[in-house]
Amino acid sequence: SLTDPNTILEEYTLNADDIESIGNTIKNDVVVVPICFSGDATVEVEYKGIVAMKDLKLNDRIMVNHDGKFEPIYSFGHGGSSSNNKNNAIKMLKIMPLGLEISDTHMIFTNSKGFIPASMIKIGDELTNDVIVTGIQNITTSAGVYAPFTPSGKLLVNGVLVSNFVAFQNSNMLNILGIDFFSFHNLAYTFESTHRIWCYHLGPCKVETYNNDGISTWVEKPFNFIQTIFQTKEANNSYYHYLLLCLILSLGIIIVCFVSMIETVFFTQSLTLIVL
């Protein structure tokens, strides 16, 4: 809340230079974390009611849409406080009127644009459940940072439908040479298929490990790799790096699409048959 002593209302502007690597960037005792919600953000847990992010546990079943569907948390992309940010405030955006505290690259669902990074949200945008954005604040918080992963790739946070994932550009679509190719949400959901198969379909994973920044070791290396590609492209802005990006993404997409196909054929359909 606005009166919470853990929340410091100061004006910060987030930009591409703020996020330099998979690790948290520390500038003037303020940390920029690329994948997260504040520990004070809330979700609804089955049979428990409203619970703060910082109190969630692996395999808690949380609400993922406005139809009342619950799904288990099979992983945390970001698992809370870390040794690198425990003494520092963390930059976030606060989306009003529901007070959603979220990192600027994390994606939120809007009725007009689908899933977009929080940095693209504007006053007057319509979110799900007829919520109209009335304000956007730049804040810092020391309540910890969390990013639950669910099988559908979605969840409700503070009553707002959000993605499990982030965008690597200030856009809802992967854009190369001015051409939109894929939704970042759908692309990330596909890339997450291997992790999802292991920790959800074949799981559950009962224990996770995190690096010093609180990032899941499942997420750390692929996220760092993709982040580096985009940073290199932005820094050089040459056709060579555009072609390199296309080549690497194409190979990656072929591989993960194959894995995703396996998930659909051998796991998703099986689960559907069990339900039927």
Image: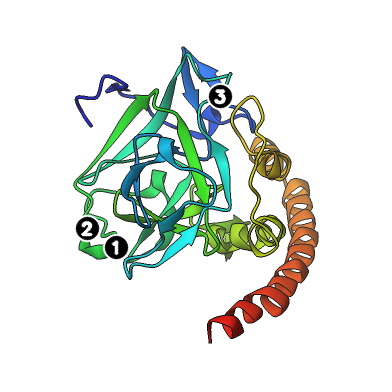
Residue closest to the eye, 150 or 19: 150
- Res 219 seen here: yes
Colour style of the rendered protein structure: rainbow
Residue 118 appears at what percent x and percent y? 40, 46
Rate crowding at label 1 as few (under 14), some (14 to 19) or many (20 or more) other CA atoms within 10 Å.
Answer: some
Checking the image for residue 131, the label placed there is: 2
Please name the amino acid that badge 1 sits on.
Thr
Whether residue 154 sits left or right of residue 109 in the image: it is: right
The quarter of the picture where residue 160 lies is bottom left
Callout 1 secondary element: helix
Does residue 38 appear anywhere in the picture? no
Report, in whole angstroms, how far the alpha carbon at label 1 lies from the one at label 3: 32 Å
Which residue in the structure is indicated by mark 3? 82
Identify which amino acid the numbered label 3 is placed on. Answer: Ser
Q: Mark 2 packing: few (<14 Cα in 10 Å), some, or many (20+)?
A: some
- The residue depicted at 47 percent of the width and 51 percent of the height is 60
Pointer 1 residue: 128
Q: Are marks 1 and 2 in contact (CB under 8 Å)?
A: yes
Judged from this view, the residue extending furthest toward the front is 47
Q: CA distance from mark 3 to mark 2?
A: 33 Å
State the image coordinates of residue 128 (x, y, percent, origin top left): 29, 63
Image quarter (top left, top right, bottom left or bottom right) of the N terminus: top left
Residue 261, percent from left and from top: 72, 74
What kind of element bears circle 2? loop
What's the CA distance linking mark 1 and mark 2? 6 Å
- Residue 232 at what x, y percent from top left? 70, 38
- Does residue 43 lie above or below 31 as drawn? below
First in residue order: circle 3 vs circle 2 = 3
Mark 3, residues whose alpha carbon is within 10 Å: few (<14), some, or many (≥20)? some
